[in-house]
Amino acid sequence: MTMGDAPLLSVAGLTTRFVTRDGVVHAVSDVGFELGRGECLGVVGESGSGKSVTMLSLLRLIPMPPGEIVSGSAVFDGEDLLALTDEALRRVRGGRIGFVFQDPMTSLNPVLTVEAQIVEALRVHGLGTREARRMRARELLELVGIPAPRERLRAYPHELSGGMRQRVMIAIALACAPPLIVADEPTTALDVTVQAQIVALVKELKRKLSTSIIWITHDLGVVAGLADRVVVMYAGQIVEEAPVRDLYKSPQHPYTRGLLASVPRADRKSSVLASIRGQPPSLDEAPASCAFAPRCDFVHERCRRENPRLARLPGGRRVACWWDLDKGGPRDA
Amino acid sequence: MTRAAPANGHLAGAMEKPAAAGPHRSLWGDVWRQFRRHKGALTGLAVLGLVVAACTAGPWVYWHDPFASDLAARNLGMSLGHPFGTDNVGRDTLARVLIGGRISLAVGLAAMLLGVLIGTLVGVMSGFFKTLDGALMRLTDMFLALPLLPLLLVTIMLFRDSLRDMLGPEAGVFLMIVFVIGATSWMQTARVVRGEVLAVKAREFVVAAASIGTRRRNVVLRHILPNVMSPVMVSASLGVATAIITESALSFLGLGFPSDFPTWGRLLFDGQNAIELTPARVIWPGIMISVTVLSVNFIGDGLRDALDPKQRGR
């Protein structure tokens, strides 16, 4: 197998938990997925479903302790991130995987100028001379569509608007031209028009730079326009994975179906939005049965006895459910 | 890129430093620009500058020798010849206040630097490294629970003579007093800094800094430390004031500098017995202490506001 065929990132069996005074929280349980080069993967799920922790675990950015990566592997570009030494991992952070965080209000250092923060991303990886780094910082601001980059470089974060700051965050993530960018709900804290601008920017960057992107969100609408493939997470596990069109056309997991039904749509008249009854489960026990069972309309006896494995379906899809929605009966296997 | 280290010597440096004009906005340039808008702080800076200048240059300019006694001019009140009067052996009080200010100010500054350094170090370590937190905070509690004045007295009694033999009377006592005051005044700084570090550490930009590959050391130095500088500055300014007052108290109790080194506190101590005869001997050193402490506090106040980037540019 040549490098060209191998996926850029291949995660398997990733399990992360937090050991707190009140007990163990099983935040991520046996998560595995692959990401091709130049591909955009959407990761969808509600708050606390383990989306962010999964991605932060890859770079060991979760606070440890209380966090603890119990098992798993994450082969990125031929090396297992979870087995790297701290120094080797530090080179990957920012150098080959860029991170964009949710809240641009708090993810920039308030006492440093924009320039200092972009330049830092280059400097920690020993890139360029001082002058070259400054030039690159200006190029990056132009690349992410910030007008008057010369002036903006000298600004402090609080002098910029939310959308502007998120562009700066993206510029920082792009600084070392990493092959992979992980964007952790980058549009959640922004208002809708700015969201659309950021999504358009990322689309353009993806086309221009052919960067792979992992886009974490709870907004199905954003994912629809951006991702090639979508992974749906629930209670720290992947419940469904499918190419983006197939997922929206025929969701195979009751949870995905519930999620899609709860998105307001302009093309359907309905006065009441559907919602999924019940609450997401607490994660204080390792999953032994289907985590969605208490909220599921298709629950049967096996769901409460056995946690469904992620089974492959035709068309590059995977689903973890004992019920076959298409057939209307229990899934064998 | 001009990023000054979080220098505590900034107090002295800021006086002459003009605003850094140029294409690059430096942190300290911005701080100075904002600082100038704080009237109280500017006044404090001017007054402190005056006191420092007087104590530095005064003894060269002023015609009376602080150590020369003149038995013909004992216990004089304030007059043109002796603006602050004289003491019981005819030494000029103004000359002694000026020369004494050198030591008092030096002790205040040095003890503050030491105290703030220890306090910041302990606070940052304790806030950033969870494993050290418990031990360091208990240590801080222990120091806070110690009865300080008796401790100072015992330490000084024990070490004064050996230090004096080793380093000479002036340097020995100076080092001892600075060390003793510094080592017993860092706890408030440590607690405040720890609290701030805990708060700053939870902010997203710290994870963001780690996510671009910043080393842990630099996460602390570049991202956490500058964000806790405002409380450190306030502690520093309060520290100068407390150190000057503690030194005065020690001298007042007769345990600070020997009487041939007239610090402000020592002058108070020597003058107290003659307070009815020559009140000027007590009043002037007292006023100097109060004025210095007050102006340092105002400067600290101004620095705290100026260090907050959200206050700047308003």
Image: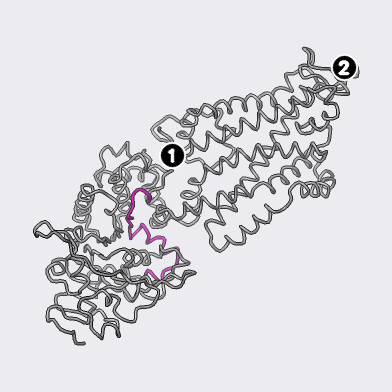
Left or right: B232 as drawn, with respect to A166:
right
Secondary element at tag 2: helix
Left or right: A20 as drawn, with respect to B132:
left
Three-letter code for the amino acid on which mark 2 is drawn: Ala
Other-residue count near label 1 (Cα within 10 Å), few / some / many at <14 / 14–19 / ≥20: many
Q: Looking at this view, is A206 or A234 the one in front? A: A234
Above or below, A96 relative to B278: below
Chain at tag 1: B
Could you tell me residue B271's position as x and y percent? 82, 28
Q: Are marks 1 and 2 on the same chain?
A: yes
As drawn, the label of residue B309 is 1
As drawn, the label of residue B73 is 2
Could you tell me residue A18's position as x and y percent? 43, 69
Quarter in which the C terminus of chain A is drawn: bottom left
Could you tell me residue B162's position as x and y percent? 84, 48
Name which residue lies at 13% across and 66% down. A245
Other-residue count near label 2 (Cα within 10 Å), few / some / many at <14 / 14–19 / ≥20: some
Name which residue lies at 52% across and 38% down. B304
